[in-house]
Image: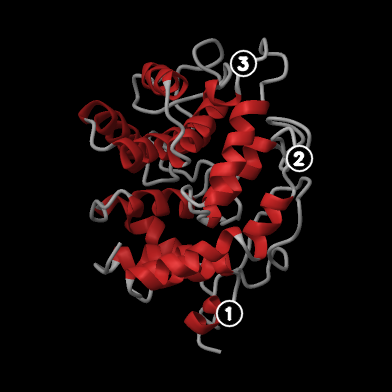
Amino acid sequence: MDVTEWLLDGDPSIRWQVMRDLTDAPADAVAAERARVAREGWGAGLLALQADDGQWGGGTYSPKWISTTYTLLLLRLLGLDPDSPEAVAAIARVRDGVTWEGRGGLPFFAGERETCVNSMVLVLGAYFHERGDHVDRLLEWLLGEQLDDGGWNCQAPRRSQKASFNTTILALEALLEVERSSGPDPIVAAARVRGEEHLLERRLFRSLTTGEVIRTPWTRFSFPPQWHYDVLRALDHLRSTGAPPDPRCDEAIDLVHRRRRADGRWPLQNTHPALRHFEMEDGDGRPSRWNTLRALRVLRWAEGGRA
C-alpha cells in the first residue's frame, strides 16, 4: 500500500492532518474530516471517558498519562476542533469542575506553580479558546520565567539557571498557540524566537560546548511525546511557525531521513511507559502512522513545500 494511502486508512485524527499537510485537500473537505474526530475513533473514545466532574483519570496531572491534563493534550494533538459542540461541552465541564489538588482549589485553567505544568495548561487554554484573566496571568508568568540563555527550566531558579530542552519545547508550543489564538503579539513572538534560538544554537540535540549528543533518547521519536523532548517534536514545532527551515536544522532533518524504514514509513520509538486509556499503535519498532505523518510533513517543509 502507498504510504499516503496507508495514512488515510487510519483514524480520522490522522486523516484530516494528512489531507491538510500532505495532500492539500480543499479546506471544506479537511474541515469535514476533522469534525469526525469528536464523533469517531480515538477522539470520541477519549471524550467518552470524561467523568461528570470534568476529570479524566481522577486527577488533574496524575495518574500519568491518563489525567485531565494529559488527556486534553492528546485531544489537542488529535486535532479535536475546539469549536465543536463536543469540545465546548468538555471544556465547560473542566472549567466548572476541575481544580488543582493541593493548590488551594485553584481552577484548572489558573495553572499551578511549575513551569512545565503551566506551559501545558497555557497551550490548552489557548487552543480551546479559554478566555479570561487566568490565561492572561499564565502567559505573563511564563514570559517572566524565560532564562538568560533564552530557554526555560521547571527547576529554575533554585536547582538550575540553565534551560531544559524538555521545559523549553513545552513553553514554545504554548507561546505559539497563544499567537494563533489571540493574534500577533511582538512580545510573545520575541520570547518564542529567543527560545527557538536556544534550540537552534545546539542543532536541536547537541551540546553547545562539546558538540556531543546531549541525550540519545532525543534522537528517537515517540508519540504521544507527553512532556518529553525529541528531535521530531522540535522540527514539527519549527515547521508549524511558518518560518523557513534554518540551516542549523540540517543535521536533525538528516536524522529524520535516516529513521525512515525501507517501506517508506517511520517506526514508533521510545514509548514512555505509563498507563494509557487505550493503544493507538502497535508498539515500538512497528510502523507508526503518527511518526510517519509528522516526519513527512517536516520533510516537505524542509524541501520547500507547503508547511
Asked whether 214 or 169 is in front, the reply is 169
Residue matched to label 3: 106
Quadrant that contains the N terminus: bottom right
- Tell which circle, 1 or 2, labels the residue nearer the N-terminal end: 1
- In the picture, measured across the screen, residue 14 lies left or right of residue 41, that is left
> Residue sitting at 58 percent across and 79 percent down?
9
Residue 191 placement: quadrant: top left
Q: Do the residues labelled 3 and 1 touch (CB within 8 Å)?
A: no
In the current view of this chain or complex, which residue is farthest to the left? 186
In the depicted view, which residue is nearer to us: 90 or 103?
90
User: Residue 276, position in %: x, y?
Assistant: 76, 50
90, 67: nearer the viewer: 90
Q: Kindly identify the amino acid type of the residue bearing the numbered disc 1.
A: Asp
Q: Say what amino acid the circle numbered 3 marks.
A: Leu
Cα–Cα span, label 3 and label 1:
42 Å
Q: What kind of residue is marked 2?
A: Ala
Q: In this view, does 305 lie above or below 77?
A: below
Mark 3 or mark 2, which is nearer the start of the sequence?
2
Mark 1 and mark 2: Cα distance apart in space: 31 Å
**In the drawing, does residue 206 fall left or right of residue 54?**
left
Q: Are marks 2 and 3 in contact (CB under 8 Å)?
A: no
Residue in view at x 69 percent, y 48 percent: 272
Quarter of the image where the C terminus is located: bottom left
Q: Mark 1 points at which residue?
A: 9
Residue 132: horizontal and vertical position, in percent? 42, 23
Q: What element carries label 1?
A: loop
The circle drawn on residue 51 is: 2
SS assignment at label 3: loop
Image colouring:
secondary structure
Mark 2 or mark 3: which is in front? Answer: 2
* Looking at the image, residue 220 lies above or below residue 106: below
